Image (tube, rainbow, N blue to C red):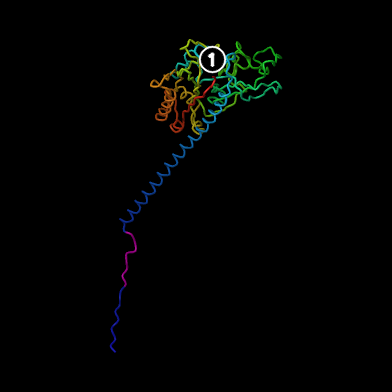
């Protein structure tokens, strides 16, 4: 038997590590993936943050406008009562006389009030401050943006709903017409809302002259609403700051009340809570001052409609401040909170007849 000699096979050893070039390529790819994921996360965070801001402002605006819808829907519509609403030639309407309602913005520098305000009677439940058994189903409803720099509600939208007594009930225990303990019933012309004792505080937005903007009957309904304007859509199609139809010779509310008004348009500017905390009151006031007051717009017939000018100008102000970081007066406003400001508007049909 012939034996074959053994053959010794030497095992081959493969390479046990990456080359330097492979390592560099791997690290580069990994870094690129990490960068892409980080950018996606940042984008998602920014979108989420912006969405949260919009949710906050949307919620605030919806609550305020829905409350107004109830108040306007039950507004008392008569020709023998007073409506404290803006109208030309009414010098006892602070904030909308002497040209304030003619637009242009920055009117606050002349000492006039910046925002609109209103007061009217409505068939909504009001606070019964007197616990009187003769409480009427009516209340005095008022809206304003607080203009007292010393108030905790400064530049915040407030609402008042004061429950009223029937006219046969009148507390004459005090001779002081400004005595807040004195109870007042529903009033009829020629008595006016701003001329009846403590009610005058409901429609005066500044301290001094025996009147104070810190009326205890007000509540903050829109803490993020810092700008408030309204206007009228007349039955003839005009969009104006005059609450009567001059085409038919009407010159005041006397004898017609709100009969010429089809709807009241309201515009508000809302900032999210986090953004407001980053803007000083003085800067927010200057920003609001850059937002024009309402001025009459075309809208009488199809093809000549230019409604929405007010809201468009307000949006332009917000975009400009977000881009430059300051107001027209140079007041600093961080871009992030400015970009969170949103403008809302709604028409409220009065449905008189």
Query: For the view shown, which residue lies furthest in the bottom direction?
Result: 1
Q: Main secondary structure of the magenta part?
A: loop
Counting labels gives 1
Answer few, some or many: residues within 10 Å of disc 1's Cα (few below 14, many 20 plus, some between 14 and 19): many
Q: Is the C terminus in the top left, top right, bottom left or bottom right quadrant?
A: top right
Task: Residue 15: say if magenta.
Answer: yes
Q: Quadrant of residue 123?
A: top right
- Residue 257, quarter of picture: top right
The N terminus, quarter of image: bottom left
Left or right: where does residue 211 sit relative to residue 39?
Answer: right
Q: Does the magenta stretch include residue 342?
A: no
**Can I make out residue 257 in this image?**
yes
Q: Which residue lies furthest to the front in this view?
A: 353
Query: x%, y% of residue 259?
Result: 53, 16
Return the x and y of residue 12 as percentages of the image width and height: 31, 70
Q: In this view, does 234 lie above or below 221?
A: above
Q: Which residue is drawn at the image coordinates 52% and 11% (left, top)?
A: 252
**Residue 108 visible somewhere in the drawing:** no
Q: Name the residue under label 1.
A: 93
- Closer to the camera in the image, 120 or 323: 120
On the rendered structure, is 140 left or right of 155? right
Q: Position of residue 196 (x, y in %)?
A: 62, 14
Give the camera-side residue of 67 and 229: 67
User: Would you place residue 98 above or below residue 132 in this image?
Assistant: above
Query: Image check: 323 left or right of 84?
Result: left
Q: Position of residue 28 (x, y in %)?
A: 34, 51
Magenta stretch, residue numbers: 11-18
Location of residue 229 with respect to 335 vertically, above or below: above
Secondary structure at badge 1 equals loop
Q: In which quarter of the image is residue 103?
A: top left
Q: Nearer the viewer, residue 69 or 235?
A: 235
């Amino acid at each position: 038997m012939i034996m074959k000699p053994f053959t010794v096979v030497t095992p081959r050893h493969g390479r046990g590590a990456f080359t330097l070039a492979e390592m560099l390529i791997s690290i580069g790819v990994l870094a690129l993936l990490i960068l892409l994921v980080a950018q996606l996360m940042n984008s998602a965070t920014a979108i989420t943050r912006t969405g949260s801001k919009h949710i906050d402002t949307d919620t605030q605006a919806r609550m305020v406008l829905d409350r107004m819808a109830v108040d306007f829907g039950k507004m008392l519509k008569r020709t023998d009562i007073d409506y404290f609403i803006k109208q030309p030639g009414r010098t006892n309407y602070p904030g909308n006389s002497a040209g304030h309602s003619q637009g242009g913005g920055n009117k606050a520098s002349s000492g006039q009030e910046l925002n609109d305000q209103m007061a009217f009677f409505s068939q909504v439940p009001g606070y019964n401050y007197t616990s009187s058994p003769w409480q009427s189903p009516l209340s005095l409803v008022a809206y304003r943006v607080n203009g007292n720099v010393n108030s905790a509600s400064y530049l915040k939208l407030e609402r008042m709903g004061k429950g009223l007594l029937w006219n046969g009930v009148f507390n004459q225990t005090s001779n002081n017409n400004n005595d807040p303990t004195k109870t007042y019933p529903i009033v009829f012309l020629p008595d006016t809302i701003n001329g009846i004792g403590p009610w005058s505080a409901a429609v005066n937005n500044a301290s001094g002259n025996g009147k104070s903007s810190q009326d205890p009957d007000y509540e903050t309904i829109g803490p993020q609403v810092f700008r408030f304007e309204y206007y009228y859509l007349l039955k003839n199609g005009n969009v104006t700051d005059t609450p009567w139809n001059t085409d038919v010779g009407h010159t005041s509310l006397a004898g017609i009340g709100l009969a010429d008004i089809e709807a009241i348009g309201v515009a508000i500017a809302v900032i999210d809570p986090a953004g407001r905390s980053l803007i000083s009151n003085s800067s927010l006031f200057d920003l609001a001052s850059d937002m024009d007051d309402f001025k009459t717009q075309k809208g009488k017939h199809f093809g000549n409609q230019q409604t929405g000018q007010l809201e468009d100008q307000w949006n332009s102000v917000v975009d400009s401040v977000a881009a430059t970081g300051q107001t027209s007066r140079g007041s600093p406003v961080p871009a992030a909170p400015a970009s969170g400001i949103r403008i809302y508007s709604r028409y409220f049909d009065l449905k008189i007849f």
